[in-house]
Amino acid sequence: MAETVTAPNVVAILRRHAEERAEQHAAAFVTDPDREDGARWLTYAELDREARSIAVRLREHVAPGDRVVLLYPAGLAFLTAFFGCLYAGAVAVPSSLPGRYRHERYRVKRIADDAGATAILTDTGTRPDVEEWITEEGLDQLPCWSPTTAPGRARTAGKRRPPATTRSPCCSTPRDPPAIPRA
């Protein structure tokens, strides 16, 4: 437990575990606790590798300190996207999916607006619904992509946003993001 207290950040802890406990389970997503195959597992090495891959893509499109809304169904993809944001120096803004009902969709829009989001990450299966929601809510300025696909808004693809100049009081001093760990 002492290492958690002395580690500079959660990324350093994950990196250390990926090096020292590579094949140990880091996380599980349980779909059916009564079945032997009712869970999907990620090792520390897998979580680290997938998070680094997402971080590399994120750094191409968002600046350190930018807010990235994570719209994922329950599962391990959310976890890898969350750590990908941390590795890239971006601020992960978890949210539920927009849903079918107007109040659910409005709530997620308010989360994106309040956070000052500059991008949205989602999984491939949910992306069409999320892009439809983006259009309906007039959030077309936000690039939306899945870590395994190109950004959905061509006008922002390949362009890296400059660091935001306005920060909330808790984040008023922009800091250099952590270096993306190499394997």
Image (cartoon, grey):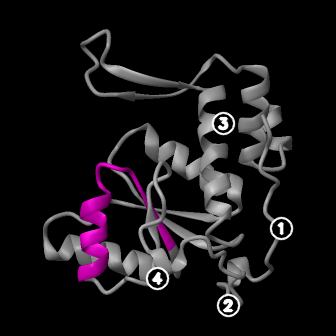
Which stretch is magenta? 119-136
The residue that mark 3 highlights is 48
The residue that mark 2 highlights is 166
Q: Give the alpha-carbon distance from disc 4 to disc 3, as whole Å.
A: 30 Å
Which numbered disc, 2 or 3, marks the residue that appears first in the sequence? 3
The image shows residue 137 at horizontal and vertical percentages of: 28, 83
Instruction: State whether residue 97 appears in this view.
Output: no
Residue 133 forms part of the magenta stretch: yes
Find out whether the residues at labels 2 and 3 contact each other: C-beta distance under 8 Å: no
Q: Give the alpha-carbon distance from disc 1 to disc 2, as whole Å.
A: 16 Å
Residue 159 in the image: above or below residue 94: below
Quarter residue 103 falls in: bottom left
Find out whether the residues at labels 4 and 3 contact each other: C-beta distance under 8 Å: no
Q: Give the alpha-carbon distance from disc 3 to disc 1, as whole Å.
A: 20 Å
The image shows residue 22 at horizontal and vertical percentages of: 70, 21
Q: Give the alpha-carbon distance from disc 4 to disc 2, as whole Å.
A: 13 Å
Dot 3: element: helix
Give amino acid for label 3: Asp
Dot 1: element: loop
- Residue 27 located left or right of residue 62: left
Give amino acid for label 4: Asp
